[in-house]
Image (cartoon, rainbow, N blue to C red):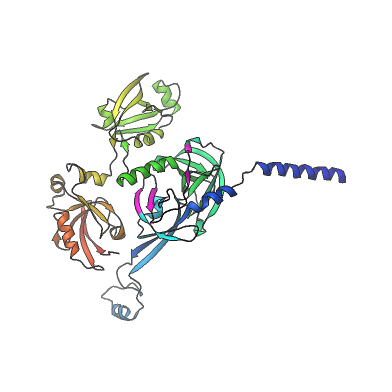
Amino acid sequence: MFKRSLLLFLGALFACSAWSGDLPDFTALVEKQGAAVVNVSTTQINEAPSGLQGGPNLPENDPFYEFFRRFAPQMPQQRESRSLGSGFIISADGYILTNAHVVDRADKITVRLTDKREYKATVVGTDKRTDVALLKIEANGLPQVVLGNPEQLKVGEWVVAIGSPFGFDSSVTAGIVSAKGRSLPQENFVPFIQTDVAINPGNSGGPLFNLKGEVVGINSQIYSRSGGYMGLSFAIPIDVAMDVVTQLRATGRVTRGRIGVSIQEMTRELADSFGLAKAEGALISGVERGGPADKAGVRASDVILKFDDKSISSSSDLPRIVAATKPGSEVGVLLWRKGSTLKVSIIVGEIQDPAAKRAMDDQGGDEKSQSISRLGLKVAELTDEQKAELQVGGGLLVLDVKGAAARADLQRGDVILAIGNIEILSVKQFNEILKQVAPGRNIALLVRRNDGTMYIPIKINDK
């Protein structure tokens, strides 16, 4: 009996030893690459709601309103909200990658290294469509990560995340690649890497490493019903992110291609009805009149099988491939039409922000647009056609919003008609009026939004 028990024990011990030998050791990876992972903390200043501070919500004509106004403790007029995320250094001179949602609307961004050094960071640019942000700190000789190739990742391969979940710096978690090329709702431009690596709030923007110690993705999202990790995490492939970085460093913005079609998934039943041997490609359900595809002769009911020599296995492949194509490029497209293949050439157009497009039409570019740094606005003068459409004599179209303007809830597409009772006719006049306003003072902007107008107060803050 003793001999049998001993043999069973030794067998189990041998099995455990053999299994342990198959598990990867992450210590060298963490020691070598961990120093390039940073903590990103942000501060956003929010204006306190107007009205009686520190007391009950009373109307001004209430007899107790004056009592509480004079004697109740006064609440601060500004409130700070803070958030935490992660990032990683991609160059020794201080360029850092993180998620766009980590730094969205931040008034102050602080980057803390593993050696406790802290730096004030500036935003070089952000791209909300891919959730990528590029930051810059004034430092040199910094540790930097090594970038890998996400295309070489295999499902089932081990991967490691380093970040600051819930503010716990330099936390390491590991798992495997669960799937590749995942499409998420409202996310047409990113073929996400799905993993089971434990990702929690604060991990966002941190790197995902392969076992070679190369960054293959940026941890961006989780699937959760509770707000915490539930076994499904999604990372932006690093090649997608670096394409965004290249454009942000060169021009401060990201351009994406478009061809002007509506598509739907090809099912087995649809494939059979169109005479396709298997369910592949993107079925075109509509073509924008006068758009790039229309000009190339593409029709509704065509099926796009290849775009620029890249196979379209699923309809979700097409938006990503088209968006990654440089606007103005002429590309070949393989179509399936009426039982046979057909090749056409399409000159790719450019996706434009709807508000920005309105301002750029008939202006030949952005010569008449200008950033208003005191308010955090980018505005453009209205064209004659836009003035006629809105039945106004002047006004400025809001193209981008951040800082004080974002806190005041100005929105892209708003039209600024006046400051107080002074009608705004040009960007130059707008700036001249703002120069006369002392820091800390409030101004009232008369804003046209949709079919209505309203005054929006904004505090001038030059800090």
Tell me which residue sits at (40%, 63%) in the image. Answer: 81
Q: Is residue 179 magenta?
A: no
Task: Count the numbered circles shown.
Answer: 0
Q: Residue at x 27, y 57 (%)?
A: 376
Q: Quadrant of the N terminus?
A: top right
Q: Residue furthest top?
A: 340
Which contiguous range is marked in magenta? Answer: 123-150
User: Residue 325 versus residue 113: which sits nearer the camera?
Assistant: 113
Q: Position of residue 418 (x, y in %)?
A: 17, 59
Q: Nearer the viewer, residue 412 or 435?
A: 435
Q: x, y (%) of residue 211?
A: 56, 42
Q: From the top left corner, tell me how far across and down residue 234 is, in percent.
A: 48, 45
**Image position, residue 307 (x, y; %):** 36, 28
Name the residue at 54% across, 42% down: 212
The reply to whether residue 418 is in sight is no
Q: Quadrant of residue 337?
A: top left
Image quadrant holding the C terminus, namely bottom left
